Amino acid sequence: MSIDHAEWAAYLLAAVDERQEVAAITKQVDELSIDDAYAVQAALLELQLGRGDTLAGAKLGLTSAAKQEQMGVAEPVYGWVLQSSVIVDGEVAVGELIHPRAEPEVVFRLAQDLAGPGIGREDALDAVEVVLGGIEVIDSRYEAFSFTLPDVIADNTSAARVAIGAQGAPPRSLDLSTLGCVFDVDGEVVGTATGAALLGDPAECLAMLANHLGKHGQKLEAGWIVMAGAPTDAKPLGIGTVVKARYSGVDAVSLKGV
Ligand code: 0L1
Ligand code: MG
């Protein structure tokens, strides 16, 4: 039976709107291919843009062993960052979400468009204006935060909110594979990693995303932010929880659940 991409996109958007977890798509269909999953993701984006939202950038997820092990999924995934998801004030309204988790992110802001195929690490770095620290709030729309690879792709890779540090650094002023990250929850260190956790180098993640989009005739655009993925696992974010991601060479980011 063929997959109705628009129907499943509406199903996921209703879960977002109603703040209600829903059964994974793969529990309800015979097969959800990776291509179908990205088509559902595209249909979901179309619905969100149709409501007046705009694109702030793109993201990778599951680019570190820590995240792949946490979620039981062994491949990187790609998604979109909506302007409405970008947090500007250091607080996240937990009641707007289902079961949010927070995770540190290495973030690129692009000075130039970047279009695959054939993009390597150096091409990717050429397109970057600045490297920033971030925290992503993910919020799977699926029951118990549990899914297969195609499910999480359809669900725009659990994207929900992102906060970005004020001051970053030019990409070639940093050794991205030794860029340090310490993740705190309520003042306690819960995770540590270096940029090498992200496919050996976060710039490789950026190149991978540009090449993935190139296969679909799409590109990363100047001015966008791109999240390279979380180098540590994600932690639950409740009301009153304060999470902080500290980085070597770029500003720290804090977020409080309210
Ligand atoms: O953790 C998850 O929900 C898996 C999807 C990828 C999310 C991410 O790493 O940004
Ligand atoms: Mg993430």
Image: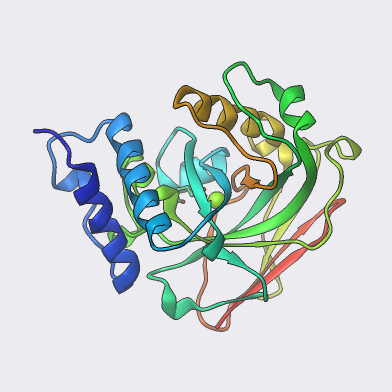
Q: Nearer the viewer, residue 114 or 25?
A: 114
Quarter location, residue 206 = top right
Q: Quadrant of the N terminus?
A: top left
Asked whether the viewer can see residue 169, the reply is yes
Where's residue 178, x and y in %? 81, 38
Q: Residue at x 52, y 25 (%)?
A: 214
Q: Residue at x 69, y 48 (%)?
A: 107
Asked if residue 69 lies left or right of residue 150, the reply is: right
Asked if residue 222 lies left or right of residue 142, the reply is: right
Asked whether the viewer can see residue 201, the reply is no
Where's residue 47, x and y in %? 34, 55
Q: Relative to 193, is 124 above or below?
A: above
Asked if residue 250 lies left or right of residue 18, the reply is: right
Q: Residue at x 77, y 60 (%)?
A: 246
Asked if residue 10 lies left or right of residue 230, the reply is: left
Where's residue 92, x and y in %? 56, 75
Q: Residue at x 52, y 56 (%)?
A: 54
Q: Quadrant of the C terminus?
A: bottom right
